[in-house]
Image (spheres, helix red, strand yellow):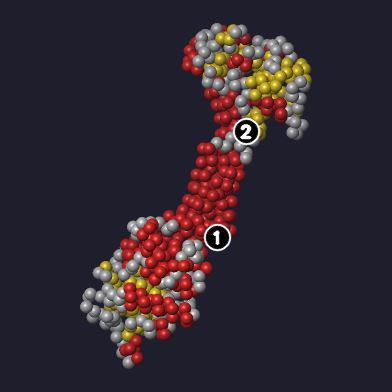
C-alpha cells in the first residue's frame, strides 16, 4: 500500500522519511523537496505528476541513487542508501534499480541485444547465461526478432521496449520510469503502458513513474502529485487536502 | 566486468573524422621517431659491421681515431712479432694502413665529396674476412690499382670497374669492386699502402693504424699485454669492433638527440590532437556515459573504457606510422663521418624492437591524450547528463 504520511508499517519495500533537497542557485537557496515521506510496497505501481520544476525528476534521481538528498533518508529493501559511498551506491543501483528513460538512452553503437546485456556484464553470469536472460527479456517486450538491430533501425516504441528489456533483465528490486511515453505517439504510448502494467501484474514488478500525461498517470495504482516540494495523493488533491509531508 | 570494448571500437568508427585527425597526428610522430632512430641504428650498424671480434686495431697511444694516429714502420715490425697474431701463408696477418681523404665528384650532384682512401696490405682480405671481391679482382701489390667498395662505386663518378682515376699524382685503375657486408669499408677505396702514401707525397714509413688478425678473440689480452708493455712501442690496442662502435657514438648520439627532440615537439602536437579528440568524444557522449553510470558501471570502468579508446586510437596511429616508414628499411643514404670527415654511406635500419618502441611511444601519447578526458567522463554529473540531448 502506498502512503505519503510517514506512518507506514516499516515493512514497505521503499521507505522515504523527511526527504529534503535544496539547491543553491546564484546565492539563493531553492528547496525542491521538503521533508517528503513515502512508503511503497512490493508490486505497487506509483505515478508521480506535477508541473515543471515541481521536483518529480529530482525525486526519481534520489530514489534511484543518482543524487543525494540534503536531509532525510531512503531505505530500499532494508538498505539505507542515503549514506552510501559513491561506489557502493553504484553497485546498489546495478543490483536494485531498473531505469526507463524518456529518450530511451540506448547506446547507439550497440545492438538491441548488446544494450540489454549491459547490466548483466556487472554480474557473475556466464556468457551463455547472459544470452538466456537477454533473450527472455527481449521476449517479454516482444522484440526477439529485432535483437541484432541497432537503435537507429528501430522505431521509438521499439527503442523504448528495448529500454524496458534492459531495465528488467537483471531482475531489479524496482523500476524507475522517467516520462516513459513522453517521446511517443499515443498508440505507442498505450503499448508501452500496457507492457509496464503487464510487468506489474504478471511479473510482480514495483514501478515508480514520473509523467506529465494524466492519461498515462491514470494507469498507475496510485497517482501522487508533487506540489511545492510535497507529495499529495490525487484523490485528496481534489478535496484540497495536503496529505504528504509538512507543508 | 568492464564496459565492453566493442562499445569503444564502434564509437571510434562512428566518429571517424575526428579519430582520423588524432590517428594521423600520432602516425606522423611515430613515423619521424622510428625513422630517426633507424637512421642512428643504421649508422651505428654500418660502423660496427666494419669491425671484427677476431681483429685488433692498433693506433698511437692517446689517438681517438685513425686520423689522429701515427704508427711508424719500426713499430709495425715489432708488432708483427707480437704473440696472439694469426699467421697466413705469407707471414703474420697484419695490415699497416694509411688513411687519406680525396675529393671525388658525386654521381648525383657532380659536386665533390670526401672519399676515404685506405692504403692496405695485399693480404687484407685474409684479415677482414667479411670483405669479398664481387667484381674483378684484388689489386696487386706494387701496381697502381685500386679496389672500390660497392657503395663508393655507385656513389662517385669514375669508380666503376675498368675506369682510371687520378688520385694524388698517380692514375689508378679500378680492378675490383668489393662488398664489405654493409660496413663503412663499402664507402672506401683501397690500394697498396706504400703506393698510396707515395702518391700523396707522404712518408711510406708511417701509417695511421695497424690491424691484425688474432689467433682467437681471447688472444687480444695477450697481444695487448705484449705491445703496451714493450718500451719501444707507444700504442693503444683495442678490439676492432669496439673501435668502430666508439667511432659511431658521436654521430648516433647526435641523430638520436636531434630525432628525439623533433619527435618530442611533434608528440606535443599529437597529444593535443588526441586530447581534443577524446574531450570531444566525452562531450558528445555525455548521455551515454551517464546511462552506463546509472546502470551501475563505476567511475573506474568509465576511466578504463575511455583510456582504452585513446589507446586504441594511438595504437592504430602507431602501427600506421611504423608501416609508413617501413619502406625506408634498407634505403641507403650518406652523411659525413665526423671522425674522418669522409662521406659514409649507410642504410636505414628498422628493426622489430624499433617498431615496438614506436608503438609504445604511440601508446604513451594515447595515455597522455586520453587520461584527463577519461577522468572528466567519470566525473560527469550523472543526473544532469542523463537528460542531455
Outermost residue, front direction? A145
Q: Can you give x and y, in whole percent of width and height, for residue B313 in the image?
A: 52, 52
Q: Can you give x and y, in whole percent of width and height, for residue B290 in the image?
A: 43, 65
In this rendering, position of residue B128 left or right of residue A139: right
Q: Residue B15 got which mark?
A: 1
Q: Can you give x and y, in whole percent of width and height, for residue A153 in the image?
A: 52, 68
Q: Is residue B207 above or below residue B326?
A: above
Instruction: Look at discs 1 and 2 and give the one toward the viewer.
Output: 1
Question: Residue at image x 62%, y 33%?
Answer: B347
Q: Residue B347 got which mark?
A: 2
Work out whether mark 1 precedes mark 2 in sequence or the reverse, and give the earlier one: 1
* Front residue (pair A152, B106): A152
Q: How many marks?
A: 2
Q: Residues within 10 Å of mark 2 (few under 14, many from 20)?
A: many
Q: Is residue B202 above or below residue B242?
A: above
Question: Residue at image x 46%, y 53%?
Answer: B308
Question: Residue at image x 34%, y 87%?
Answer: A234
Q: Secondary structure at mark 1?
A: loop
Q: Is residue A130 above or below residue B105?
A: below
Q: Can you give x and y, in whole percent of width and height, for residue B231 in the image?
A: 52, 8
Q: Residue B202 got which mark?
A: none
> Is residue B10 visible to us here?
yes
Chain letter for mark 2, please.
B
Amino acid at each position: 500500500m502506498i502512503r505519503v504520511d510517514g506512518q507506514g508499517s516499516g515493512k514497505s519495500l521503499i521507505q522515504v522519511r523527511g526527504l529534503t533537497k535544496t539547491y543553491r542557485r546564484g546565492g539563493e537557496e531553492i528547496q525542491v523537496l521538503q521533508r517528503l515521506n513515502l512508503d511503497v510496497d512490493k508490486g505497487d505501481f506509483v505515478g508521480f505528476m506535477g508541473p515543471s520544476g515541481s521536483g518529480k525528476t529530482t525525486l526519481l534521481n534520489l530514489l534511484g541513487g543518482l543524487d543525494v538528498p540534503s536531509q532525510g533518508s531512503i531505505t530500499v529493501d532494508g538498505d539505507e542508501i542515503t549514506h552510501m559511498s559513491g561506489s557502493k551506491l553504484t553497485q546498489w543501483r546495478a543490483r536494485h534499480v531498473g531505469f526507463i528513460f524518456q529518450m530511451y538512452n540506448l547506446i547507439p553503437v550497440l545492438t538491441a541485444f548488446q544494450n540489454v546485456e549491459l547490466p548483466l556484464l556487472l554480474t557473475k553470469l556466464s556468457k551463455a547465461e547472459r544470452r538466456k536472460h537477454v533473450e527472455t527479456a527481449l521476449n517479454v517486450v516482444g522484440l526477439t526478432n529485432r535483437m541484432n538491430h541497432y537503435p537507429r533501425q528501430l522505431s521509438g516504441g521499439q527503442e523504448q521496449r528495448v529500454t524496458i528489456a534492459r531495465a528488467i533483465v537483471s531482475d531489479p528490486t524496482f523500476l524507475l520510469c522517467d516520462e516513459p511515453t513522453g517521446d511517443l505517439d499515443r498508440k505507442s504510448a498505450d503499448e508501452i503502458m500496457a507492457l509496464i502494467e503487464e510487468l506489474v501484474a504478471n511479473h510482480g514488478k514495483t514501478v515508480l513513474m514520473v509523467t506529465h500525461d494524466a492519461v498515462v498517470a491514470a494507469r498507475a495504482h496510485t497517482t501522487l502529485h508533487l506540489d511545492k516540494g510535497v507529495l499529495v495523493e490525487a484523490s485528496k488533491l481534489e478535496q484540497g487536502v495536503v496529505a504528504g509531508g509538512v507543508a | 566486468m568492464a564496459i565492453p570494448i566493442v562499445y569503444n571500437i564502434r564509437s571510434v568508427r562512428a566518429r571517424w573524422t575526428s579519430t582520423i585527425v588524432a590517428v594521423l597526428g600520432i602516425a606522423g610522430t611515430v613515423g619521424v621517431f622510428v625513422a630517426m632512430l633507424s637512421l642512428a641504428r643504421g649508422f651505428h650498424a654500418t660502423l660496427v659491421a666494419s669491425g671484427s671480434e677476431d681483429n685488433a686495431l692498433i693506433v698511437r697511444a692517446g689517438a681517438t681515431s685513425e686520423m689522429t694516429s701515427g704508427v711508424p714502420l719500426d713499430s709495425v715490425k715489432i708488432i708483427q712479432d707480437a704473440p696472439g697474431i694469426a699467421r697466413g701463408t705469407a707471414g703474420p696477418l697484419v695490415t699497416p694502413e694509411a688513411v687519406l681523404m680525396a675529393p671525388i665528384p658525386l654521381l648525383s650532384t657532380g659536386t665533390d665529396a670526401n672519399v676515404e682512401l685506405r692504403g692496405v696490405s695485399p693480404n687484407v682480405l685474409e684479415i677482414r674476412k667479411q670483405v669479398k671481391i664481387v667484381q674483378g679482382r684484388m689489386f696487386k701489390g706494387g701496381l697502381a690499382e685500386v679496389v672500390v667498395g660497392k657503395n663508393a662505386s655507385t656513389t662517385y663518378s669514375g669508380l666503376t670497374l675498368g675506369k682510371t682515376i687520378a688520385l694524388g699524382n698517380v692514375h689508378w685503375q679500378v680492378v675490383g669492386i668489393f662488398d664489405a657486408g654493409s660496413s663503412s669499408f663499402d664507402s672506401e677505396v683501397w690500394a697498396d699502402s706504400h703506393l698510396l702514401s707515395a702518391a700523396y707525397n707522404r712518408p711510406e714509413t708511417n701509417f695511421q693504424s695497424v690491424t691484425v688478425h688474432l689467433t682467437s678473440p681471447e688472444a687480444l689480452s695477450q697481444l695487448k699485454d705484449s705491445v703496451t708493455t714493450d718500451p719501444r712501442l707507444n700504442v693503444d690496442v683495442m678490439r676492432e669492433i669496439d673501435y668502430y662502435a666508439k667511432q659511431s657514438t658521436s654521430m648516433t648520439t647526435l641523430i638520436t638527440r636531434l630525432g628525439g627532440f623533433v619527435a618530442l615537439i611533434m608528440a606535443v602536437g599529437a597529444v593535443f590532437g588526441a586530447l581534443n579528440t577524446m574531450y570531444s568524444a566525452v562531450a558528445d557522449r555525455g548521455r551515454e556515459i551517464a546511462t552506463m553510470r546509472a546502470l551501475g558501471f563505476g567511475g573506474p570502468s568509465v576511466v578504463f573504457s575511455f583510456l582504452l579508446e585513446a589507446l586504441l586510437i594511438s595504437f592504430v596511429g602507431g602501427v600506421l606510422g611504423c608501416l609508413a616508414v617501413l619502406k625506408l628499411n634498407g634505403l641507403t643514404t650518406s652523411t659525413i663521418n665526423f671522425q674522418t670527415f669522409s662521406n659514409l654511406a649507410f642504410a636505414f635500419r628498422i628493426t622489430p624492437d624499433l617498431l615496438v618502441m614506436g608503438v609504445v611511444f604511440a601508446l604513451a601519447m594515447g595515455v597522455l591524450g586520453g587520461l584527463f578526458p577519461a577522468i572528466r567522463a567519470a566525473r560527469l554529473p550523472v543526473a544532469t547528463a542523463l537528460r542531455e540531448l
